[in-house]
Image: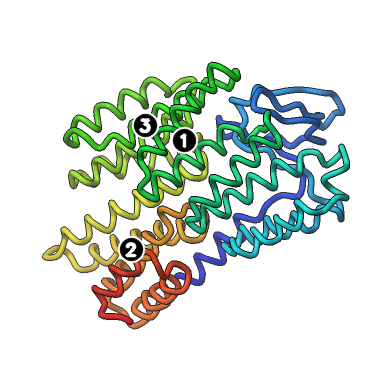
């Protein structure tokens, strides 16, 4: 099961080699070329040859045509990221930044901001908080109007939060909120900052947190669906904490089917679905054995999707290794036990300092 799913998802993740704009509403525009991109707008040439533009708040991702030989190294870095080899990708991106053939040609002016942002993402995936902060600072200094301005600030805030530096993370979110006003950034990012600050507020009981997040989801539903999706993921997580698995499952499934979430939010939604099936299975200890096995299988599949499709979701991937391995082991067959052990080995190899490896090592009496 693990090998088949991995092969299928990797095939599905293959990146196109043509210029595209992925919009926040889930649509993908294939275009002839991207002419310019900033935190205010993206200007592009349409398939028919005309010029058009989109407000940056409507654009989730910009993908350039990588067919030029000069972009082979950059394309290799993307491939390394797609396979989860973030140290290799980071090293290649450093080489790209030193390539004067690219850095000095106006046609490839876009490469610098894309390379620095991808480098920050690699460092994020390696849980390198200092590296993320330094690379983000370099990006904002070298390309002040970068399309990735707010996304980079979000990366910096999130890695600080993951590393336990809540106060520093709040400072970055507050700065982003101020930049929306002072720099004219799309309003979406003040809503993202508001949600980020809300998630750092651990006060109140589950119902109070759910109400607060529901208010943010409703506030953003029409104009900022990606923000609303992130809030809804967190509502689902609160429901899981309260053992309301059926209701949480509906929340997560709605997010996945809506097609209005970014990759980090989708990773969290699939992780949440995995949790629903896993904890429901645990609660079925005295129930139907075949149904319980089916629930564990679905839990494993959702967590395996996180591992395979969302490798740079550093806060989720080690956790999904743990829960997928536990679910497979609970299925009690020689095949799934072998697959569980393979996942445990992957977790140890890729995330040896992770708390999830320490937990699995302790619970399985591993070395």
Measured as percent of width and height from the top left, residue 169 is found at: 41, 38
Q: How are the residues colored?
A: rainbow
Q: Say whether disc 2 or disc 1 marks the residue closer to the N-terminus.
A: 1
Q: Say whether disc 1 or disc 3 marks the residue closer to the N-terminus.
A: 3
Mark 1 lies on a secondary structure that is helix
Quote the CA–CA distance across marks 2 and 3: 25 Å
Q: Badge 3 local density, few (<14 within 10 Å), some, or many (20+)?
A: some
Residue indicated by mark 1? 258
Q: Nearer the viewer, residue 74 or 234?
A: 74
Foreground mark, 2 or 1, reads 2
Q: Say whether disc 2 or disc 3 marks the residue closer to the N-terminus.
A: 3
Mark 3 lies on a secondary structure that is helix
Q: Quadrant of residue 200?
A: top left
* Residue 356 vertical position relative to residue 262 in the rendered view, above or below: below
Residue indicated by mark 2? 355
Q: Residue at x 63, y 51 (%)?
A: 119
Q: Residue at x 51, y 60 (%)?
A: 308
Foreground mark, 1 or 3, reads 3
Measured as percent of width and height from the top left, residue 352 is found at: 41, 70
Q: Quadrant of residue 354?
A: bottom left
Residue 197: which numbered mark, if any? 3
Quote the CA–CA distance across marks 1 and 3: 25 Å
Measured as percent of width and height from the top left, residue 240 is found at: 24, 46
Judge from the rendering whether residue 111 lies leftward or rightward of residue 269; answer left or right. right
Measured as percent of width and height from the top left, residue 265 is found at: 45, 42
Quote the CA–CA distance across marks 2 and 1: 33 Å
* Residue 264 vertical position relative to residue 57 in the rendered view, above or below: below
Q: Badge 1 local density, few (<14 within 10 Å), some, or many (20+)?
A: few
Judge from the rendering whether residue 238 lies leftward or rightward of residue 176; answer left or right. left
- Residue 310 at least partly seen: no
Judge from the rendering whether residue 224 lies leftward or rightward of residue 216; answer left or right. right
């Amino acid at each position: 099961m693990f090998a088949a799913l991995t092969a299928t998802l990797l095939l599905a993740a293959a990146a196109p080699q043509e210029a595209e704009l992925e919009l926040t509403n889930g649509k993908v525009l294939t275009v002839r070329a991207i002419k310019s991109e900033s935190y205010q707008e993206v200007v592009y040439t349409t398939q028919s040859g005309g010029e058009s533009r989109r407000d940056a708040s409507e654009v989730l991702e910009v993908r350039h045509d990588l067919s030029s030989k000069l972009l082979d190294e950059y394309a290799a870095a993307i491939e390394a990221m797609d396979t989860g080899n973030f140290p290799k990708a980071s090293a290649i991106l450093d080489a790209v930044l030193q390539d004067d053939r690219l850095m000095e040609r106006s046609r490839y002016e876009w490469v610098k901001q894309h390379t620095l942002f991808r480098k920050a993402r690699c460092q994020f995936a390696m849980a390198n908080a200092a590296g993320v902060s330094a690379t983000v600072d370099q990006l904002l200094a070298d390309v002040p109007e970068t399309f990735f301005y707010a996304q980079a600030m979000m990366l910096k805030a999130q890695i600080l939060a993951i590393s336990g530096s809540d106060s520093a993370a709040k400072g970055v979110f507050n700065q982003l909120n101020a930049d929306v006003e002072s720099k004219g950034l799309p309003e979406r990012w003040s809503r993202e900052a508001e949600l980020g600050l809300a998630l750092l507020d651990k006060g109140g009981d589950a119902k109070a947190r759910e109400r607060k997040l529901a208010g943010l989801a409703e506030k953003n539903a029409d104009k900022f669906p990606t923000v609303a999706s992130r809030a809804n993921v967190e509502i689902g997580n609160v429901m899981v904490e309260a053992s309301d698995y059926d209701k949480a499952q509906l929340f997560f499934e709605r997010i996945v089917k809506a097609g209005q979430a970014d990759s980090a939010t989708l990773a969290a939604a699939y992780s949440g679905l995995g949790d629903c099936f896993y904890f429901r299975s645990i609660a079925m200890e005295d129930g139907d054995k075949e149904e319980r096995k089916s629930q564990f299988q679905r839990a494993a599949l959702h967590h395996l999707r996180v591992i395979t499709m969302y490798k740079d979701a550093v806060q989720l991937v080690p956790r999904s290794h743990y829960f997928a391995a536990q679910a497979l082991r609970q299925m009690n067959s020689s095949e799934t036990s072998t697959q569980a052990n393979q996942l445990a080995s992957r977790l140890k190899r890729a995330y040896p300092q992770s708390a999830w490896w320490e937990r699995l090592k302790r619970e399985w009496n591993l070395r």
